[in-house]
Image: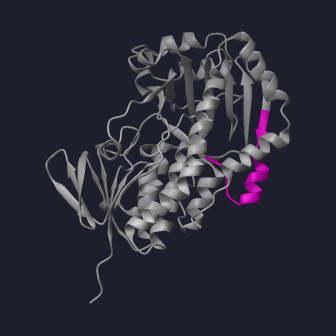
Amino acid sequence: MSSPPPTAIVVGAGIGGLTAAAALRRTGYQVRIFERATDLLPAGSALALTCNASVALRQMGIELNLNGRAVQWDRLHFKTAAGQVIRTIHYRHFIQEFGVPMLAVHRADLQQALLEQVGEESVTLGATATGYDVDGDQVQVAFSDGHTVRGDVLIGADGIRSAVRRQLLGPEELRDGDYICWLATPHFTHPRVTPGYAAHYWGRGRRFGLADIGNGRVYWWGTLNMPGEAARTWKGDREEIERTYAGWADEVGAVLRATPDDTIITIPAQDRPFRGSWGTGPVTLLGDAAHPMMTSLGQGAAMAVEDGVVLAQCLAGADTISAGLRAYEDARRPRTHQMVQASYALSRIEQAEHPLAVLGRRLYFRWVPQRSIDARNRAALTFQGAS
């Protein structure tokens, strides 16, 4: 009689957790996913599914049905607060080179597409993991309602405040970026926001992003410098956000006025200093639980997708689960470390407030050689699976 397939317990049904589950199923694992939220419909947030993420999914044979749920984009405009173009970055040559699109998609739509790959029956909602115990070759996960689950591998994909990470690495402080982020996805039309439109507007100590995500919706985000404690406890409203961007490009003010107050998400900018240890025995971390990063590179979701695919590849080629997990961590550590550092450094530049720093940023970005920009983008957009 053949032995049953190994069971993977995934804590967290975000982009990384669902990707890992879909990829592991393709390598013969049984997968059970536990999510503390009571639904999978996060409001107000969208993301970029960049070429590297799409290539990673393709390597695992994961074909997401995003028709009608995502918008292709091939350029990103960087503008002044008033809307004057500083520089436009083109991605069409990368799209042709890698053979996959760049997509802007609502987070809930991407989660639903991934959920279709793993099956809703694999997900238990309203399940908050509190800790785990390793027992020989297996791991037992405990939940806040008192029940436990046993499996052969535990993947902590439970975000920046991961309970799995806390047990692995002990108490840690989050690192404040000293600015606040506002996010929303309203229905909105404007003559300047054409299909596939994506732009970042740079001011002094504040930024704004605006992107078409299809079906009459846009994704906007805004930032404003303030001490970390103020960002964590901010209790303002849309009118205060409007005042933050008073006098900016017409489309910025227009989309703010079109956004209901109760649909705006407010979060402090935070990450963690990179840690090289992600796991031990049958336990590992993934995505924001392993390497949370600032949003400046727009690669957070893509890194989680890459993690999920490389994890499955390493486990499939390993003699033991523990060896496969350590191989995954070794494979992912250099790339994610570089992304965390680069995102943090770029966020400091983008949030510059001193007039001379703002002028220097604009002049540098306008005149830096295209080959330098292409080299950086190619490095970010190139996925390399497990060797």
Residue shown at the point (46%, 33%) measured from the top left: 44
Q: Residue 39: where, in percent of width, then height? A: 32, 45
Q: Magenta segment, which residues?
A: 88-103
- Left or right, residue 317 beside residue 338: left
Q: Is the image coloured rainbow, by chain, by secondary structure, or in one colour? A: one colour
- Left or right, residue 248 beside residue 162: right
- Left or right, residue 280 beside residue 102: left
Q: Residue 81: where, in percent of width, then height? A: 70, 18
- In the picture, the quarter occupied by the C terminus is bottom right
Question: Is 177 situated above or below 57?
Answer: above
Residue shown at the point (32%, 40%) measured from the top left: 170
Image quadrant where residue 216 sits? top right
Q: Residue 63: where, in percent of width, then height? A: 55, 64
Question: Is 350 situated above or below 279?
Answer: above
Residue shown at the point (77%, 49%) measured from the top left: 92
Residue at the farthest left position: 146
